[in-house]
Image (spheres, grey):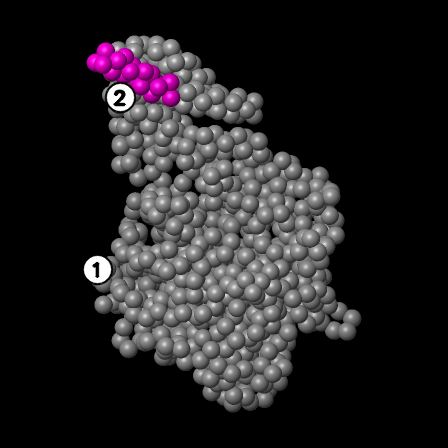
Amino acid sequence: MADNRIQRVPQRGGVLARISAVVVSILGLVLLAGGVWLIALGGSLYYGLAGLALLIDGVLMFRHSKAAYPFFALILAATLVWSLYEVGFDFWQLVPRGDILVPIAIWLLLPPISGSFRNITGFGRGTLAVALVLCLIVLGYSLTRSGDDLVGSLPSASSDGPAQADLASLPDSDWQAYGRTGYGDHFSPLSQITPENVQKLKVAWTFHTGDLPDVGRADPQESTFEVTPLKVDDRVYLCSPHQWVFALDATTGKEIWKFDPKVKDDATFQHLTCRGVSYHKTPTGALTSDGKPAPEECPERLILPTNDGRMIAIDAKTGKTCGAFGVNGEIDMKDGMTVTRPGFWEGTSPPVVTQKYIIMAGGVTDNYSTEEPSGVVRAFDVYTGKLIWAWDSGAEDENALPSADHHYTANSPNSWTISSVDEKLGLVYIPVGNPTPDIWAGNRTPLMERYSSSIVALNIDTGKKVWSYQTVHHDLWDMDPPSQPSLVDLKTKDGIVPAIYVPAKTGNIFVLDRRNGQLIVPAPETPVPQGAAPGDRTSPTQPYSQLTFQPKAALTDADMWGATMFDQLACRIMFKGMKYEGPFTPPSTSGTVVFPGDVGMFEWGGIAVDPKRQIAIANPMAFPFVSKLIPRGPDNPAAPNAEHPPGSEIGVQPMYGTPYGVDLHPFLSPIGLPCPHPPWGYMAGIDLRTHQVVWKHKVGTTRDATPLPIGIKIGMPMLGGPLTTAGGVAFLTSTMDNYIRAFDVTTGQELWSDRLPAGGQSTPMSYEAGGKQYVVTAAGGHGSFGTKLGDSVIAYTLN
């Protein structure tokens, strides 16, 4: 019996050896096939050679050759050398290059496994062990490297900072506009919360709107809770995705009133979003535009744009509509339009409200058709709703008002995001988008494009253009200015200069004199890739601001990433099979990599500015997209039909009226990870006196983006912007993991975080009530971004 047991041991061991050989051989075959494909596309030789080597090693293992282990050690060592050559000591780029081979090496060195190979010698085990230890040492050392982070310190608070006008325009305790003031600086002058005590922040109150996506309502995929609340006196005002408006007690969060505009949405809307409402208080002796005394009703009013094309005035005290405004308290924003289909014009962002006017722009359905509503910007009497002026960016006469024989120009460039205003200068600053479709411009005329992807300064009283600056010429990538510009009185050697900071999706921040549009920070015209699809063209150059977060080098296939070497290989194959020559590579029928992607390095959240310290806080991201033109055919009809309704901005877009549709989607690996390597998102600090990025740190973890709830800090994509305070603390909630975070403004160090009940794709604000400073954020998620949906508004204060 003893002899029989001795004979069975090698048989069991032989099974483990055969299993190891089969696994290594299969991995080799897969790598060899994919590697040959990549080589044919002009990519790296490594995968093909590594696949062939693994296949050979699998054969050696089958034969129990004593060369099997030393040969695998050679593969491991060669992979390490190749990895270091491609990416250096970057931990997250090294991981997918070794997270298959290193575990196999560990497996092979386990005594039961190595003992199952009859001819493996101590030398063979030793060489493999040495190669494995070298890999682990390199990985360990790479963990100590800061990678893409930039360490530095912003200048401290200065007593000689400019006396910025907006800081004196309202009580420190209030937050009366989307960016707190019309300057759009997202800065609170409150200083109760500091880096020293921020760890003591606790939830003060939570409010639930009850407004959750409902299948019965057939809500669109782009259902989002992006609101930045307002605070006036003792009340907080906010809106929810269906444009329900709430007034809350600022101290307790208890509901005072609710207004429901009965928005008639459906699944064909591209957006179900309300970023905020606007506030106006009637000054003593105010007159309407007709010279009559302002009505006594609604001495304090909120202005609400809706996704079904209305604008409503609401009494801030009672929650009732202001009957003298428009018709029974509302205006039909489709008046004067040639395209009036509900949902094609959407008011997703709050308007600018001055002492006398409401200045309202709106978004249109992107990439559906060339027959879209006008992007006209209009000013209305804040009391009566009377139309005062119009600025129609695509019209020959920009300021022509509608009449029986004149309508606003269909499909003129629109402004879907938030504008800023300087009432002292008498100028409103409009970020202007593109004529839709965004990805094809062969049919655009010079008249249509003169203001596309621009920042335009208009006279508040007349709507006449004072100056404009174009951030992208002949935009084929949807790279319009996406966020509220920030106005800063900038201290320079030549005195105080009224500046405007314009974040762009490209990662550029354009800095101009807001009086005349002259550049303060140079933005030289730079040659860009050419070769548009037939029927279109490209601009030979584009402006590149010297204040920028755009990646310094174009992507290469070495930048492709994955959870393993296999999905990394798939990303490299996809990358080499598409068109990419750097930023501004034109769309193509083979697919073009758009990096930074269509979402932009900056989006609607904008930046936050401390005007006293002359610093800014930004949260740029670098997330790749693919833009693939689809010629007309059976699956891509030339005219609208019921099978191709408008809807999400992601996926196949018909672009009716052009020769192509377009497929827009994130550039992801087969298992859903972004193909270019992390980090994808940062917090950053900018010294506005030098216009240098002083610190930059990745922000966001994998906690809510993977099946396993593991929070690995790699720098995540985000939607929403930062808040900064005079106490030296900045706040952010917009990352894909469900957290609110606090940062030391001086160094960027993360000081505190708290778990949110849903995605925080919003921009926080801060106010004071009852002697306490509060930080408030909406946590309701974002449909197409894929974060958890909810209906919470949460306020924090010091314990």
Q: Residue at x 45, y 41 (%)?
A: 673
Q: Residue at x 49, y 34 (%)?
A: 571
| Main secondary structure along the magenta-highlighted residues | helix
On the question of residue 62 being in view, the answer is yes
Number of numbered discs on residues: 2
- The x, y position of residue 328, in whole percent, is 60, 83
- The x, y position of residue 768, in whole percent, is 32, 73
Query: Which residue is the site of mark 1?
Result: 196
Magenta span: 1-19
Which numbered circle lies on residue 112?
2
How would you rate the neighbour count of disc 2 (Cα within 10 Å): few for under 14, some for 14-19, many for 20 or more?
some
Left or right of 799: which side holds 353? right
Q: SS class of the residue under badge 1?
A: loop
- Residue 7 in the magenta stretch? The answer is yes
Q: Residue at x 58, y 34 (%)?
A: 578
Of labels 2 and 1, earlier in sequence is 2
Q: CA distance from mark 2 to mark 1?
A: 55 Å
Pick the residue in front: 170 or 458: 170
